Amino acid sequence: MDPVIDLETTLRQAGLRVTAPRIAVLRALETRPHADADEVFRAIAGDLPGTSLQAVYVVLGALTDAGLLRRIEPAGSPARYERRTGDNHHHVVCTRCGAVDDVDCVHGDAPCLTPSSTGGYAITTAEVTFWGLCPACQAADVPVRA
């Protein structure tokens, strides 16, 4: 099946109108998970030259509200977006370059962590961010041998 038709169906099933910017944003995030709005804007600018950064923010918000995207906000980083939703996975962030990768939930079911106290809340998800150095930054720290 045509990938664009699949995205059109996905949008319609989420109750959204099919628009070129929405299709373009979804396509960009297929190959750029954890992209911020600026990255998405640069990715679609060639195909949709009349699109503004503000329009990208509006599309990202609508797709997130519809459950088609997940918004994550690592400390010290702009909001990032991904298409992987609904599985309560977590993230690891490089403290040097800001790279972000997925970490599957340890137990597989949401929430995968149990807080010591819920304060009366009915807990449905847990969001964990692990911090460290990515493989590329670790390799850059390796001293060069003569």
Image (cartoon, rainbow, N blue to C red):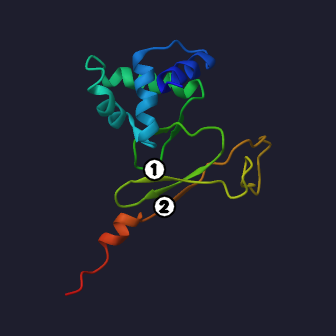
Helix, strand or loop for disc 2: strand
The disc label shown at residue 75, or none: 1
Q: Relative to residue 10, is residue 43 drawn left or right?
A: left
Q: Callout 2: few (<14), some (14-19), or many (20+) C-alpha neighbours within 10 Å?
A: some
Mark 2 or 1, which is nearer the eye? 2
Residue at the left extreme? 146
Q: Relative to residue 40, is residue 19 drawn left or right?
A: right
The disc label shown at residue 131, or none: 2
Query: Could you tell me which quadrant the N terminus lies in?
Result: top right
Residue drawn at the location 46% of the way across and 27% of the way down: 60
Amino acid at the residue labelled 2: Trp
Rendered position, 11 above or below 106: above
Q: Nearer the viewer, residue 102 or 53?
A: 102
Q: Nearer the viewer, residue 125 or 22?
A: 22
Q: Earlier in the sequence, mark 2 or mark 1?
A: 1
Please state the horizontal and vertical placement of residue 99, each as a whole percent of the image: 40, 54
Residue drawn at the location 40% of the way across and 66% of the way down: 135
Q: Relative to residue 90, is residue 3 drawn left or right?
A: left
